Amino acid sequence: MFGKYKLSLQLKEKDIEITIDGRGKRRRYYRKVGEEEEEKYIYAENGEIVICPVEPVNLPKEGTAEHLLIELEKSIIIEPNVKDSFYVKFPIEIGVFLIDKTDVERIDIFTRVKPKYILYGSPESGIICRWWKSNVYNDVPEVDRTYEGVMKVDIKNSYKEWVEIKKLVFRAFDMKIFYDGYAYMHSQVEILKKLMGETSFIKRRPKGMKESIDIYLAKGIKRFEKKFVMEWGFK
Amino acid sequence: MNLTDVKNLFKYNIPGISIPIYKFLIFIVVIFVSIIIAQIVKINIRRTFKERVPKTTLSLMEKIAYYGILIIGFLAALGNLGFQLSGLLFTGGIIGIVIGFASQTVVSNLVSGLFLLIEKPIKVGDGVSIGDVSGVVKDIRVLSTTIRTWDGIYVRLPNEKVFTSNIQNFVAHAARRFEYKIGIRYKDDAEKAMEIIKNLLEEHPLILKEPAPQVFVAELGDSSVVLAVRIWAPSQHWFSVRTEMLWKIKVALEKEGIQIPFPQRVIWMAGKTEG
Protein backbone atom coordinates (compact mmCIF):
# COMPACT_ATOMS: atom_id res chain seq x y z
CA MET A 1 0.00 0.00 0.00
CA PHE A 2 2.77 2.48 0.85
CA GLY A 3 4.45 4.14 -2.10
CA LYS A 4 4.12 6.58 -4.95
CA TYR A 5 1.18 6.45 -7.37
CA LYS A 6 -0.16 8.34 -10.37
CA LEU A 7 -3.28 10.45 -10.12
CA SER A 8 -5.45 7.44 -10.75
CA LEU A 9 -5.46 4.49 -8.42
CA GLN A 10 -7.49 1.84 -6.75
CA LEU A 11 -6.17 0.14 -3.63
CA LYS A 12 -7.67 -2.32 -1.18
CA GLU A 13 -5.98 -3.82 1.83
CA LYS A 14 -7.79 -5.30 4.86
CA ASP A 15 -10.69 -2.89 5.40
CA ILE A 16 -8.97 0.06 3.71
CA GLU A 17 -10.16 1.17 0.29
CA ILE A 18 -8.61 4.08 -1.58
CA THR A 19 -9.76 5.21 -5.01
CA ILE A 20 -8.78 8.15 -7.15
CA ASP A 21 -10.77 8.33 -10.35
CA GLY A 22 -11.94 10.91 -12.85
CA ARG A 23 -10.39 12.37 -15.96
CA GLY A 24 -8.31 15.36 -16.95
CA LYS A 25 -7.98 17.97 -14.27
CA ARG A 26 -10.90 16.79 -12.20
CA ARG A 27 -10.39 13.81 -9.95
CA ARG A 28 -12.29 12.32 -7.07
CA TYR A 29 -10.54 10.95 -3.98
CA TYR A 30 -12.47 8.37 -2.03
CA ARG A 31 -11.30 6.51 1.06
CA LYS A 32 -13.10 4.05 3.28
CA VAL A 33 -11.79 2.48 6.49
CA GLY A 34 -14.31 0.26 8.20
CA GLU A 35 -17.44 2.42 8.31
CA GLU A 36 -15.63 5.72 8.04
CA GLU A 37 -15.59 7.41 4.64
CA GLU A 38 -13.87 10.45 3.20
CA GLU A 39 -14.41 11.99 -0.20
CA LYS A 40 -12.70 14.97 -1.81
CA TYR A 41 -12.24 16.46 -5.24
CA ILE A 42 -8.78 17.07 -6.59
CA TYR A 43 -8.35 19.59 -9.37
CA ALA A 44 -4.91 18.73 -10.68
CA GLU A 45 -3.29 17.62 -13.88
CA ASN A 46 0.22 17.11 -12.64
CA GLY A 47 1.62 15.61 -9.51
CA GLU A 48 1.73 12.25 -7.85
CA ILE A 49 0.12 10.60 -4.88
CA VAL A 50 2.25 9.37 -2.00
CA ILE A 51 0.76 7.05 0.61
CA CYS A 52 3.00 6.59 3.61
CA PRO A 53 2.97 6.11 7.39
CA VAL A 54 3.01 9.35 9.39
CA GLU A 55 3.54 10.40 13.00
CA PRO A 56 0.65 8.94 15.04
CA VAL A 57 -0.57 12.13 16.72
CA ASN A 58 -3.02 13.63 14.23
CA LEU A 59 -6.24 11.77 15.00
CA PRO A 60 -9.00 12.12 16.05
CA LYS A 61 -8.23 15.83 16.43
CA GLU A 62 -5.08 17.51 15.26
CA GLY A 63 -3.06 19.22 17.94
CA THR A 64 -4.26 16.95 20.74
CA ALA A 65 -0.75 15.66 21.40
CA GLU A 66 2.79 16.04 20.21
CA HIS A 67 4.22 12.99 21.93
CA LEU A 68 3.91 9.24 21.77
CA LEU A 69 4.01 7.18 24.95
CA ILE A 70 4.78 3.51 24.53
CA GLU A 71 3.89 1.46 27.56
CA LEU A 72 5.86 -1.77 27.74
CA GLU A 73 3.86 -4.89 28.59
CA LYS A 74 6.76 -6.11 30.70
CA SER A 75 9.22 -3.77 32.39
CA ILE A 76 12.88 -3.71 31.52
CA ILE A 77 15.33 -3.45 34.42
CA ILE A 78 18.64 -2.14 33.21
CA GLU A 79 22.01 -2.24 34.93
CA PRO A 80 24.21 0.89 35.30
CA ASN A 81 26.42 1.75 32.32
CA VAL A 82 24.89 -0.82 30.04
CA LYS A 83 23.88 -0.35 26.40
CA ASP A 84 21.43 -2.61 24.63
CA SER A 85 18.83 -2.68 21.88
CA PHE A 86 15.34 -4.05 21.54
CA TYR A 87 12.28 -3.61 19.35
CA VAL A 88 8.79 -2.37 20.12
CA LYS A 89 5.72 -1.82 17.98
CA PHE A 90 4.28 1.64 17.50
CA PRO A 91 0.96 2.84 16.04
CA ILE A 92 0.89 4.51 12.67
CA GLU A 93 -1.47 6.80 10.91
CA ILE A 94 -1.54 6.67 7.14
CA GLY A 95 -1.09 9.87 5.20
CA VAL A 96 -2.17 10.47 1.62
CA PHE A 97 -0.30 13.34 -0.02
CA LEU A 98 -0.36 15.08 -3.36
CA ILE A 99 3.14 16.08 -4.37
CA ASP A 100 4.74 17.96 -7.21
CA LYS A 101 8.19 19.44 -7.70
CA THR A 102 7.60 22.35 -5.35
CA ASP A 103 4.87 21.47 -2.90
CA VAL A 104 3.40 18.77 -0.72
CA GLU A 105 -0.32 18.88 0.00
CA ARG A 106 -1.99 16.61 2.53
CA ILE A 107 -5.16 15.02 1.20
CA ASP A 108 -6.07 12.71 4.04
CA ILE A 109 -4.86 11.02 7.21
CA PHE A 110 -6.53 7.95 8.61
CA THR A 111 -5.91 5.01 10.86
CA ARG A 112 -7.29 1.55 11.42
CA VAL A 113 -6.98 1.70 15.19
CA LYS A 114 -8.88 3.87 17.60
CA PRO A 115 -6.37 6.24 19.16
CA LYS A 116 -6.16 6.61 22.91
CA TYR A 117 -4.47 9.39 24.83
CA ILE A 118 -2.75 9.52 28.19
CA LEU A 119 -1.30 12.12 30.52
CA TYR A 120 2.43 11.82 31.18
CA GLY A 121 3.31 13.72 34.36
CA SER A 122 0.95 15.67 36.56
CA PRO A 123 -2.20 17.48 35.34
CA GLU A 124 -0.64 20.89 36.03
CA SER A 125 2.68 20.38 34.30
CA GLY A 126 2.42 17.11 32.37
CA ILE A 127 1.83 16.52 28.68
CA ILE A 128 -0.84 14.71 26.70
CA CYS A 129 0.59 11.79 24.72
CA ARG A 130 -0.78 9.29 22.24
CA TRP A 131 -0.83 6.00 24.11
CA TRP A 132 0.28 2.63 22.82
CA LYS A 133 1.10 -0.65 24.52
CA SER A 134 3.74 -2.95 23.14
CA ASN A 135 5.64 -6.01 24.05
CA VAL A 136 9.44 -5.92 23.99
CA TYR A 137 11.04 -7.96 21.21
CA ASN A 138 14.62 -9.11 20.73
CA ASP A 139 14.21 -9.31 16.94
CA VAL A 140 12.12 -7.42 14.42
CA PRO A 141 8.53 -8.48 15.23
CA GLU A 142 5.85 -9.23 12.70
CA VAL A 143 3.42 -6.37 12.40
CA ASP A 144 0.15 -5.59 10.70
CA ARG A 145 1.51 -2.85 8.51
CA THR A 146 -1.87 -1.21 8.12
CA TYR A 147 -1.84 0.06 11.70
CA GLU A 148 1.52 -0.58 13.36
CA GLY A 149 5.23 -0.25 12.71
CA VAL A 150 8.51 -1.38 14.24
CA MET A 151 10.72 0.81 16.38
CA LYS A 152 14.27 -0.18 17.23
CA VAL A 153 15.26 1.24 20.60
CA ASP A 154 18.93 1.70 21.53
CA ILE A 155 18.97 2.11 25.29
CA LYS A 156 21.83 3.23 27.50
CA ASN A 157 21.81 3.56 31.26
CA SER A 158 24.22 6.38 32.11
CA TYR A 159 22.99 6.49 35.69
CA LYS A 160 24.86 4.86 38.56
CA GLU A 161 21.91 2.71 39.69
CA TRP A 162 19.60 0.05 38.25
CA VAL A 163 16.58 1.59 36.57
CA GLU A 164 13.22 0.02 35.72
CA ILE A 165 11.60 1.08 32.46
CA LYS A 166 7.88 0.66 31.98
CA LYS A 167 7.20 3.48 29.55
CA LEU A 168 9.00 5.53 26.94
CA VAL A 169 7.94 8.92 25.61
CA PHE A 170 8.99 10.26 22.22
CA ARG A 171 8.54 13.66 20.65
CA ALA A 172 6.56 13.47 17.40
CA PHE A 173 8.41 16.57 16.13
CA ASP A 174 11.59 14.56 16.23
CA MET A 175 10.33 11.35 14.59
CA LYS A 176 11.70 10.11 11.32
CA ILE A 177 9.64 7.31 9.82
CA PHE A 178 10.92 5.09 7.03
CA TYR A 179 8.96 2.49 5.16
CA ASP A 180 9.29 -0.39 2.82
CA GLY A 181 6.72 -3.08 3.45
CA TYR A 182 6.16 -1.71 6.95
CA ALA A 183 6.89 1.47 8.92
CA TYR A 184 10.18 1.69 10.79
CA MET A 185 11.84 4.09 13.23
CA HIS A 186 15.11 3.96 15.12
CA SER A 187 15.19 5.64 18.51
CA GLN A 188 17.72 6.25 21.24
CA VAL A 189 17.01 6.35 24.96
CA GLU A 190 19.55 7.53 27.48
CA ILE A 191 18.81 7.20 31.17
CA LEU A 192 20.29 10.16 32.99
CA LYS A 193 18.78 9.78 36.44
CA LYS A 194 16.44 7.43 38.24
CA LEU A 195 13.46 9.45 37.01
CA MET A 196 14.92 11.24 34.03
CA GLY A 197 15.96 10.26 30.54
CA GLU A 198 16.38 11.60 27.05
CA THR A 199 14.78 10.18 23.94
CA SER A 200 15.62 10.99 20.34
CA PHE A 201 15.64 9.47 16.87
CA ILE A 202 18.34 8.33 14.50
CA LYS A 203 17.56 9.89 11.14
CA ARG A 204 19.80 7.69 8.96
CA ARG A 205 17.79 5.93 6.27
CA PRO A 206 18.05 2.13 6.47
CA LYS A 207 19.08 0.44 3.24
CA GLY A 208 16.19 -0.34 0.91
CA MET A 209 13.73 1.85 2.80
CA LYS A 210 12.10 5.11 1.76
CA GLU A 211 11.64 8.19 3.87
CA SER A 212 8.08 9.07 4.87
CA ILE A 213 6.74 12.54 4.25
CA ASP A 214 7.25 14.63 7.33
CA ILE A 215 3.79 15.76 8.44
CA TYR A 216 5.14 18.88 10.13
CA LEU A 217 7.16 19.97 7.13
CA ALA A 218 4.10 19.29 4.98
CA LYS A 219 2.20 21.70 7.23
CA GLY A 220 5.02 24.25 6.93
CA ILE A 221 6.08 23.94 10.57
CA LYS A 222 9.78 24.22 11.22
CA ARG A 223 11.28 22.07 13.91
CA PHE A 224 13.51 23.47 16.59
CA GLU A 225 13.53 21.18 19.57
CA LYS A 226 15.02 17.78 19.08
CA LYS A 227 15.50 15.48 22.05
CA PHE A 228 12.73 14.91 24.53
CA VAL A 229 13.52 14.91 28.23
CA MET A 230 11.45 12.40 30.16
CA GLU A 231 11.32 14.19 33.48
CA TRP A 232 8.44 12.35 35.10
CA GLY A 233 10.05 8.94 35.24
CA PHE A 234 9.78 5.65 33.42
CA LYS A 235 7.01 3.92 35.39
CA MET B 1 23.44 80.81 -5.69
CA ASN B 2 27.07 79.70 -5.25
CA LEU B 3 28.56 77.19 -2.77
CA THR B 4 29.25 79.85 -0.12
CA ASP B 5 25.62 80.92 -0.25
CA VAL B 6 24.51 77.32 0.29
CA LYS B 7 26.92 76.96 3.28
CA ASN B 8 25.60 80.21 4.75
CA LEU B 9 22.02 79.06 4.22
CA PHE B 10 22.72 75.96 6.32
CA LYS B 11 24.15 78.16 9.08
CA TYR B 12 21.02 80.31 9.28
CA ASN B 13 18.98 79.94 12.39
CA ILE B 14 15.41 78.82 12.19
CA PRO B 15 13.44 81.92 13.12
CA GLY B 16 12.29 81.94 16.71
CA ILE B 17 14.23 78.96 18.03
CA SER B 18 17.85 79.95 17.19
CA ILE B 19 18.86 76.53 15.87
CA PRO B 20 20.91 76.38 12.64
CA ILE B 21 19.10 74.66 9.78
CA TYR B 22 21.88 72.09 9.29
CA LYS B 23 21.50 70.96 12.93
CA PHE B 24 17.78 70.65 12.44
CA LEU B 25 18.39 68.60 9.29
CA ILE B 26 20.77 66.33 11.23
CA PHE B 27 18.02 65.98 13.88
CA ILE B 28 15.55 64.88 11.17
CA VAL B 29 18.09 62.48 9.63
CA VAL B 30 18.93 60.89 13.02
CA ILE B 31 15.22 60.41 13.79
CA PHE B 32 14.66 58.99 10.31
CA VAL B 33 17.64 56.61 10.60
CA SER B 34 16.54 55.46 14.06
CA ILE B 35 13.04 54.70 12.67
CA ILE B 36 14.61 52.62 9.90
CA ILE B 37 16.89 50.79 12.37
CA ALA B 38 13.93 50.19 14.72
CA GLN B 39 11.89 48.75 11.81
CA ILE B 40 14.76 46.48 10.73
CA VAL B 41 15.30 45.23 14.30
CA LYS B 42 11.55 44.68 14.73
CA ILE B 43 11.30 42.65 11.51
CA ASN B 44 14.33 40.58 12.45
CA ILE B 45 12.97 39.89 15.92
CA ARG B 46 9.72 38.71 14.33
CA ARG B 47 11.51 36.50 11.81
CA THR B 48 13.84 34.98 14.38
CA PHE B 49 11.40 34.36 17.21
CA LYS B 50 8.07 33.91 15.40
CA GLU B 51 7.89 30.15 15.95
CA ARG B 52 9.90 30.05 19.16
CA VAL B 53 8.04 32.34 21.52
CA PRO B 54 4.33 32.91 22.19
CA LYS B 55 2.57 35.63 20.21
CA THR B 56 2.11 37.94 23.21
CA THR B 57 5.77 37.73 24.26
CA LEU B 58 6.85 38.34 20.67
CA SER B 59 4.64 41.40 20.47
CA LEU B 60 6.14 42.73 23.73
CA MET B 61 9.71 42.07 22.51
CA GLU B 62 8.99 43.91 19.26
CA LYS B 63 7.51 46.90 21.03
CA ILE B 64 10.33 47.17 23.58
CA ALA B 65 12.98 47.01 20.82
CA TYR B 66 11.13 49.39 18.51
CA TYR B 67 10.34 52.11 21.04
CA GLY B 68 13.69 51.65 22.85
CA ILE B 69 15.59 52.41 19.63
CA LEU B 70 13.29 55.35 18.86
CA ILE B 71 13.85 56.85 22.31
CA ILE B 72 17.64 56.43 22.06
CA GLY B 73 17.58 58.00 18.58
CA PHE B 74 15.41 60.87 19.77
CA LEU B 75 17.65 61.60 22.76
CA ALA B 76 20.79 61.45 20.56
CA ALA B 77 19.15 63.81 18.06
CA LEU B 78 18.16 66.25 20.81
CA GLY B 79 21.75 66.29 22.10
CA ASN B 80 22.84 67.41 18.64
CA LEU B 81 20.40 70.32 18.80
CA GLY B 82 22.14 71.53 21.93
CA PHE B 83 19.54 70.40 24.44
CA GLN B 84 20.96 69.45 27.81
CA LEU B 85 19.80 65.89 28.39
CA SER B 86 20.05 66.28 32.16
CA GLY B 87 17.69 69.24 31.97
CA LEU B 88 15.44 67.28 29.64
CA LEU B 89 15.37 64.35 32.02
CA PHE B 90 14.53 66.71 34.88
CA THR B 91 11.78 68.35 32.86
CA GLY B 92 10.65 64.93 31.68
CA GLY B 93 10.52 63.76 35.28
CA ILE B 94 8.33 66.69 36.32
CA ILE B 95 6.09 66.20 33.29
CA GLY B 96 6.01 62.49 34.04
CA ILE B 97 4.80 63.11 37.58
CA VAL B 98 2.13 65.52 36.36
CA ILE B 99 0.98 63.11 33.66
CA GLY B 100 1.18 60.27 36.14
CA PHE B 101 -1.17 61.98 38.54
CA ALA B 102 -3.45 62.99 35.71
CA SER B 103 -3.60 59.51 34.22
CA GLN B 104 -3.40 57.15 37.12
CA THR B 105 -5.84 54.70 35.56
CA VAL B 106 -3.87 54.56 32.31
CA VAL B 107 -0.61 53.97 34.18
CA SER B 108 -2.27 51.39 36.40
CA ASN B 109 -3.57 49.57 33.32
CA LEU B 110 -0.17 49.79 31.68
CA VAL B 111 1.66 48.38 34.70
CA SER B 112 -0.99 45.67 35.12
CA GLY B 113 -0.56 44.83 31.42
CA LEU B 114 3.18 44.45 31.87
CA PHE B 115 2.67 42.22 34.89
CA LEU B 116 0.15 40.13 32.95
CA LEU B 117 2.70 39.66 30.18
CA ILE B 118 5.38 38.68 32.69
CA GLU B 119 3.25 36.48 34.94
CA LYS B 120 1.26 34.99 32.04
CA PRO B 121 -1.84 33.75 33.86
CA ILE B 122 -3.59 33.86 30.47
CA LYS B 123 -2.49 33.56 26.85
CA VAL B 124 -4.11 34.47 23.56
CA GLY B 125 -6.45 31.61 22.62
CA ASP B 126 -7.03 30.40 26.20
CA GLY B 127 -10.53 29.73 27.46
CA VAL B 128 -10.85 31.80 30.64
CA SER B 129 -13.18 33.28 33.18
CA ILE B 130 -12.13 36.70 34.49
CA GLY B 131 -14.44 38.07 37.13
CA ASP B 132 -17.89 37.73 35.59
CA VAL B 133 -16.66 37.47 31.98
CA SER B 134 -16.06 34.08 30.38
CA GLY B 135 -14.72 33.36 26.91
CA VAL B 136 -11.64 33.07 24.74
CA VAL B 137 -8.76 35.55 25.08
CA LYS B 138 -8.38 37.27 21.71
CA ASP B 139 -5.66 39.79 22.53
CA ILE B 140 -3.60 41.06 25.43
CA ARG B 141 -2.61 44.65 24.74
CA VAL B 142 -0.66 47.11 26.81
CA LEU B 143 -3.75 48.73 28.32
CA SER B 144 -6.51 46.20 27.84
CA THR B 145 -7.37 42.56 27.24
CA THR B 146 -10.04 41.56 24.77
CA ILE B 147 -12.24 38.52 25.25
CA ARG B 148 -14.69 36.89 22.90
CA THR B 149 -17.38 35.51 25.17
CA TRP B 150 -18.77 32.03 24.53
CA ASP B 151 -21.78 33.60 22.82
CA GLY B 152 -19.56 35.66 20.52
CA ILE B 153 -19.62 39.08 22.18
CA TYR B 154 -16.56 41.32 22.13
CA VAL B 155 -15.54 42.41 25.63
CA ARG B 156 -12.69 44.79 26.40
CA LEU B 157 -11.38 44.55 29.93
CA PRO B 158 -8.94 47.12 31.33
CA ASN B 159 -5.77 45.30 32.38
CA GLU B 160 -6.09 46.59 35.93
CA LYS B 161 -9.41 44.75 36.23
CA VAL B 162 -7.92 41.58 34.73
CA PHE B 163 -4.96 41.75 37.10
CA THR B 164 -7.06 42.26 40.23
CA SER B 165 -9.84 39.79 39.34
CA ASN B 166 -10.01 36.09 40.04
CA ILE B 167 -8.81 34.40 36.89
CA GLN B 168 -9.82 30.88 35.97
CA ASN B 169 -7.86 29.54 33.02
CA PHE B 170 -9.62 26.45 31.68
CA VAL B 171 -6.73 25.31 29.51
CA ALA B 172 -3.66 26.27 31.56
CA HIS B 173 -3.16 22.64 32.53
CA ALA B 174 -2.80 19.82 30.06
CA ALA B 175 -5.80 17.88 31.37
CA ARG B 176 -8.91 18.56 33.37
CA ARG B 177 -11.59 16.51 35.04
CA PHE B 178 -15.36 16.69 34.90
CA GLU B 179 -18.06 14.66 36.57
CA TYR B 180 -21.51 13.25 35.87
CA LYS B 181 -23.97 12.02 38.42
CA ILE B 182 -26.25 9.34 36.99
CA GLY B 183 -29.10 7.77 38.92
CA ILE B 184 -30.27 4.22 38.21
CA ARG B 185 -33.20 2.27 39.65
CA TYR B 186 -32.68 0.37 42.90
CA LYS B 187 -33.61 -2.86 41.18
CA ASP B 188 -30.90 -2.42 38.50
CA ASP B 189 -27.49 -4.06 38.84
CA ALA B 190 -25.11 -1.21 39.75
CA GLU B 191 -22.04 -3.37 39.07
CA LYS B 192 -23.26 -4.06 35.55
CA ALA B 193 -24.06 -0.37 35.00
CA MET B 194 -20.56 0.62 36.09
CA GLU B 195 -19.04 -1.98 33.77
CA ILE B 196 -21.07 -0.66 30.81
CA ILE B 197 -19.96 2.90 31.55
CA LYS B 198 -16.30 1.90 31.96
CA ASN B 199 -16.33 0.06 28.61
CA LEU B 200 -17.87 3.08 26.93
CA LEU B 201 -15.24 5.40 28.40
CA GLU B 202 -12.45 3.06 27.29
CA GLU B 203 -13.70 3.33 23.70
CA HIS B 204 -13.45 7.11 23.55
CA PRO B 205 -10.04 8.32 22.26
CA LEU B 206 -10.04 11.60 24.17
CA ILE B 207 -10.95 10.17 27.56
CA LEU B 208 -7.52 9.75 29.07
CA LYS B 209 -6.13 6.34 29.87
CA GLU B 210 -4.35 7.95 32.82
CA PRO B 211 -5.50 9.53 35.08
CA ALA B 212 -8.00 6.72 34.67
CA PRO B 213 -11.73 7.47 34.71
CA GLN B 214 -13.53 6.63 37.94
CA VAL B 215 -17.01 5.12 38.13
CA PHE B 216 -18.48 4.38 41.55
CA VAL B 217 -21.66 4.45 43.62
CA ALA B 218 -21.66 7.93 45.09
CA GLU B 219 -24.98 8.03 46.88
CA LEU B 220 -28.03 5.97 47.76
CA GLY B 221 -30.56 8.63 46.85
CA ASP B 222 -34.29 9.03 47.50
CA SER B 223 -35.29 7.76 44.11
CA SER B 224 -32.15 6.17 42.67
CA VAL B 225 -28.71 4.72 43.22
CA VAL B 226 -26.44 7.59 42.14
CA LEU B 227 -23.34 6.67 40.16
CA ALA B 228 -20.51 9.18 39.91
CA VAL B 229 -18.50 9.19 36.69
CA ARG B 230 -15.25 11.16 36.79
CA ILE B 231 -13.45 11.69 33.52
CA TRP B 232 -10.11 13.30 32.65
CA ALA B 233 -9.77 14.75 29.15
CA PRO B 234 -7.26 17.03 27.40
CA SER B 235 -8.15 20.60 28.41
CA GLN B 236 -8.59 21.65 24.79
CA HIS B 237 -11.28 19.04 24.20
CA TRP B 238 -12.94 18.51 27.58
CA PHE B 239 -16.11 20.39 26.66
CA SER B 240 -16.77 18.39 23.50
CA VAL B 241 -16.15 15.14 25.41
CA ARG B 242 -18.44 16.30 28.22
CA THR B 243 -21.30 17.17 25.89
CA GLU B 244 -20.87 13.95 23.93
CA MET B 245 -20.60 11.34 26.65
CA LEU B 246 -23.62 11.95 28.89
CA TRP B 247 -26.15 10.98 26.24
CA LYS B 248 -24.01 8.05 25.10
CA ILE B 249 -23.96 6.72 28.66
CA LYS B 250 -27.74 7.08 28.91
CA VAL B 251 -28.27 5.23 25.62
CA ALA B 252 -25.78 2.46 26.52
CA LEU B 253 -27.43 1.88 29.91
CA GLU B 254 -30.93 1.77 28.47
CA LYS B 255 -29.79 -0.65 25.78
CA GLU B 256 -28.88 -3.07 28.57
CA GLY B 257 -32.19 -2.55 30.34
CA ILE B 258 -30.83 -0.20 33.00
CA GLN B 259 -33.06 2.83 33.41
CA ILE B 260 -32.72 6.28 34.88
CA PRO B 261 -35.78 6.63 37.16
CA PHE B 262 -38.04 9.63 37.63
CA PRO B 263 -38.14 11.08 41.14
CA GLN B 264 -40.59 8.98 43.14
CA ARG B 265 -42.16 8.95 46.57
CA VAL B 266 -44.03 6.13 48.31
CA ILE B 267 -47.08 7.43 50.18
CA TRP B 268 -48.68 5.36 52.95
CA MET B 269 -52.33 6.25 53.45
CA ALA B 270 -53.25 6.58 57.17
CA GLY B 271 -56.18 4.41 58.38
CA LYS B 272 -56.07 1.97 55.49
CA THR B 273 -56.41 -1.58 56.80
CA GLU B 274 -54.20 -4.33 55.53
CA GLY B 275 -55.46 -7.20 53.40
Image: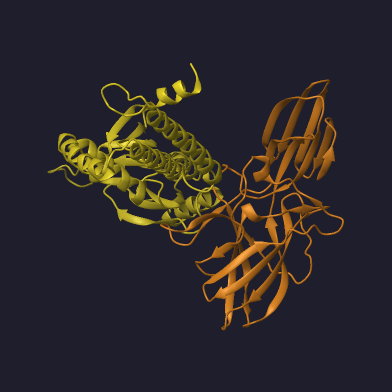
Q: Residue furthest top?
A: B1
Q: Colour of chain B?
A: yellow
Residue at point 65% right, 45% down?
A216
Query: Which of these two is toward me, A16 or B238?
Result: B238
Q: How is the image coloured?
A: by chain
Left or right for A55, reference B181: right
Query: Which of these two is toward me, B122 or A61?
Result: B122
Residue at point 64% right, 40% down?
A220
Give the vertical position of B216 relative to A47 (above or below). Answer: below
Q: Quadrant of residue A81?
A: bottom right
Residue at point 73% right, 69% down?
A137
Left or right for A8, reference B96: right
Q: Residue furthest left?
A: B271
Expressed as whole percent of the image width and height from the top left, the position of residue B19 reads: 32, 29
Expressed as whole percent of the image width and height from the top left, the position of residue B258 reads: 44, 46
Expressed as whole percent of the image width and height from the top left, the position of residue A188 reads: 67, 67
Q: Colour of chain A?
A: orange
Expressed as whole percent of the image width and height from the top left, the position of residue B224 reads: 32, 48
Residue A27 in sight here: yes
Left or right for A35, reference B2: right
Q: Residue furthest right?
A: A208
Left or right for A233, reference A38: left
Residue B165 in sight here: no
Q: Quadrant of residue A86?
A: bottom right
Query: Which of these two is toward me, B217 or A222?
Result: A222
- Total number of numbered discs in the rendering: 0
Q: Quadrant of residue B69?
A: top left
